Image (cartoon, coloured by chain):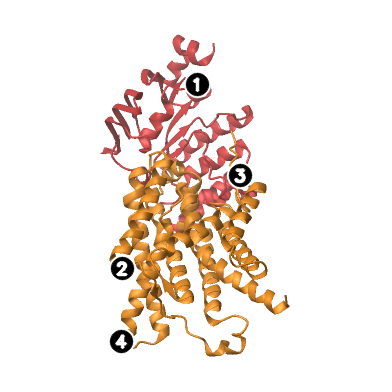
Chain colours: A red, B orange
Amino acid sequence: MLKLKNVQSFYGKIQALKDISLEIQAGEIITLIGANGAGKSTTLMAICGVQPARAGEILFMGKAIHNLSPHAIVGMGIAQVPEGRRIFPYLSVLENLEMGAFLRKDKSRIKQDMDYLLDLFPILAERRHQAGGTLSGGEQQMLAISRALMARPKLLLMDEPSLGLAPLIVKQIFEIIKKINMENQTTIFLVEQNANMALRVAHRGYVMENGRITLTDLAANLLSNEAVKKAYLGL
Amino acid sequence: MSWDYFIELFLGGLTRGSIYALIALGYTMVYGIIELINFAHGEIYMIGAFTALIIASVLSLFGMHQLVVLVLAVVLAVVYACAYGFTVEKIAYKPLRKAPRLSVLISAIGMSLFLQNYVLLAQTSDFLPFPKLIPDFEFWEPYSHIISSQELTIIATTVVVMILLTFLIKFTTIGKAMRATAQDKIMAALVGIDVNHIISITFIVGSATAAIGGVLIASHIGQINFFIGFIAGIKAFVAAVLGGIGSIPGAVLGSLVLGWTESFFTGYISSDYEDVFAFLFLVFILIFRPAGILGRSQTQKV
């Protein structure tokens, strides 16, 4: 479904992505783990066209997307739950959700999806008219996930959805990730520092270090890999 | 110091404030979305007034009814000013989207000087008489000693424009996208909003209200030249800062406060120091509320 071939990306003169190649099949949950500053978020921003790839190819459902603008890429069915959630702070919860469906034209289905999500997250329904910025971290994360789902994405990119959240809420978030994947067949590309949790929900995983992919395997194998255990699982 | 005099000054201030508000909206909307003080905005207002003058002069040759002339002049001034606003953004600001803010600011000042001198060369440096486009309404005759038809039209038009704009920003998808873009451009792009498109729309809307203001004030005062945009632009900019730049209700409130300040000070104290009072008041407000009356303070949550 998504294929990155030798993607390179730069911030000024600093190279953030060095020859990244990876592949995601439809229906999979793939996780990308690695330390702070390894280039995980940059990989997601490169896929979305926000931090353009300077060299290499990005193919989505067989079509090259690395030269498209972000809104065109979103239009093809890629949505992102970005790092730090990036809720529109002065828009209400409902308006944030509406913005998620910005490119959709099927008004009645949008309404249905919104009702479904408000049902799934009753706390958001309770706060529907509150400004997004007044929500707690966990509520914002739920809103960010819901907003991305409002686009009915074929591929959902998630950047550190567990960051800064209480353990109980982290568990809840990972259950939701599984649920989205199972119920809607949405393909998920999950970037995480919480390697333990991420590898437990994912089918396959990639390990990233200093802008390079250093390892890839089935998630179960990575969980038992000695090097991964030592570097990322704290065992 | 009679009651009537007070009412007169109050309504005079309201009229001035309305005009400032029509221009200040453009400043505040553009600042809200790309954090740029668009110094060329006053020139858009001036170009709106010049367009209306040309259209009105041509149309009155055909002996059209005054109201028809007014409507056509306003509509064409708006179209023309929007085209200028749109083009200025594309030429002078869009290529600098990733440049330091100071570069864009200098580009804006350059654009302002360019447009002033372009009108100076294309037209003249003299003041040109501007026809009285707003008629004296017969039904308003009994009350015209309190407030003239002209002033009434200016205030009413401003109110209508504000209501339409509030509706646009609060309830339409485009308006919500404008707010989303102002709050977080990257996230706006990530939900599929074409950010450049939204920025263009913001410039167009701001230019439209400025052009309406330009035509109304030109008709009220009765003369224009290439420099009117500078003065009005600075005043409206002050109003926008006073209210809290980036805030739309703030721009309106700041404009009214500025209008009344000028009107009351000139009326009760001296007309020689009109601008002095206006700017003194600005300094005074900014000392106590640095972000403006309705501005959000720039604290960032980490």
Is A52 in front, or is A215?
A52
Element on which disc 2 rests: loop
Q: Which chain carries label 4?
A: B
**Mark 3–mark 1 distance (CA, rounded to whole Å):** 38 Å
Given the image, on which type of amino acid does mark 2 rest?
A: Gln
Instruction: Name the mark on residue B297.
Output: 3
- Can residue B167 be seen here? The reply is no
User: Label 2: which residue?
Assistant: B123
**Mark 4–mark 3 distance (CA, rounded to whole Å):** 54 Å
Given the image, on which type of amino acid does mark 4 rest?
A: Phe
User: Label 4: which residue?
Assistant: B62
Given the image, on which type of amino acid does mark 3 rest?
A: Ser
Given the image, on which type of amino acid does mark 1 rest?
A: Ala
Camera-nearest label, 2 or 1 = 2
Above-or-below relation of B74 to A120: below
**Mark 2–mark 3 distance (CA, rounded to whole Å):** 44 Å
Element on which disc 3 rests: loop
Above-or-below relation of A2 to B108: above
What residue is drawn where x is 44% and y is 81%?
B132
**Mark 2–mark 1 distance (CA, rounded to whole Å):** 69 Å
